[in-house]
Amino acid sequence: MINEIIKKNGVTYGVIAGVLLSLITAVMYAIDIKLFIAWWTTLLSFSVFIIVPIIMLSKTKKELNGILSFKEAFTTYFISAVVAVLISVVFKIILFNFIDPSVKETLLDLTIKYLISTSEQFGVPASSLNETVSKLRETDPYSIVEQLKGSVFVLFFCAILGLIMAAFFKSNTTQE
């Protein structure tokens, strides 16, 4: 059975993180579509998975009178990550597949242009680049299925990050 404080904080901060990630997506969409391929916007989104959990785990540990096991810290983090990713992915699915499906083609073209320019800088052979571009054109990275696949990868990444954060925030046990 999950402690109510862990469950409450995980869900609450997951909603906060999910809303922040959705707001970042909405602002990028509203300001300039090119922001979706900017490296710093990825860092901004990544920072949500760092900053919000630090606040959440600090609060959870305080509410549990300074005693937070590794398992409890990881569980709290992972609950919040699942909620945040779910909210963010649902928002992106709605935006890219129902509100403005035409933006998917624009984003694909921008992604391909960015891929070509960076690949040329690193001396990637043209044949390899052409194959990658053709595979990109065959798929729809913003489709519902691809968004859901991507969320699995994000949750895997979050699990690793959660293990690191849980190790950092767990209480030190003392032997009597």
Image (cartoon, rainbow, N blue to C red):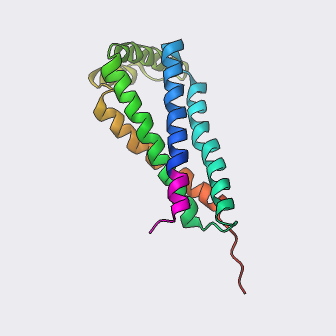
* In the rendered image, the vertical position of residue 21 relative to residue 114, given as above or below: below
Q: Is residue 3 magenta?
A: yes
Q: Is residue 111 magenta?
A: no
Total numbered labels: 0
For the C terminus, the image quarter is: bottom right
> Which of these two is toward me, 46 or 18?
18
Can you see residue 118?
Answer: no
> Which of these two is toward me, 154 or 10?
10
Can you give x and y, in whole percent of width and height, for residue 174 in the image? Answer: 72, 79
* In the rendered image, the vertical position of residue 97 relative to residue 148, given as above or below: above
Instruction: Please identify the quarter of the rendering in which residue 175 is found.
Output: bottom right
Tell me the residue at 52%/52% (across/down). Answer: 10
For the N terminus, the image quarter is: bottom left
Side of 45 where 87 appears, left or right = left
* In the rendered image, the vertical position of residue 104 relative to residue 57, given as above or below: above
> Which of these two is toward me, 109 or 84?
84
Can you give x and y, in whole percent of width and height, for residue 113 in the image? Answer: 45, 14
> Which of these two is toward me, 108 or 6?
6
Magenta stretch, main secondary structure class: helix
Can you see residue 174?
Answer: yes
Tell me the residue at 44%/34% (across/down). Answer: 88
Can you give x and y, in whole percent of width and height, for residue 56 in the image? Answer: 62, 50
Tell me the residue at 51%/65% (across/down). Answer: 3
Q: Which residue is most to the bottom?
A: 176
Q: Which region shows up in magenta?
A: 1-10
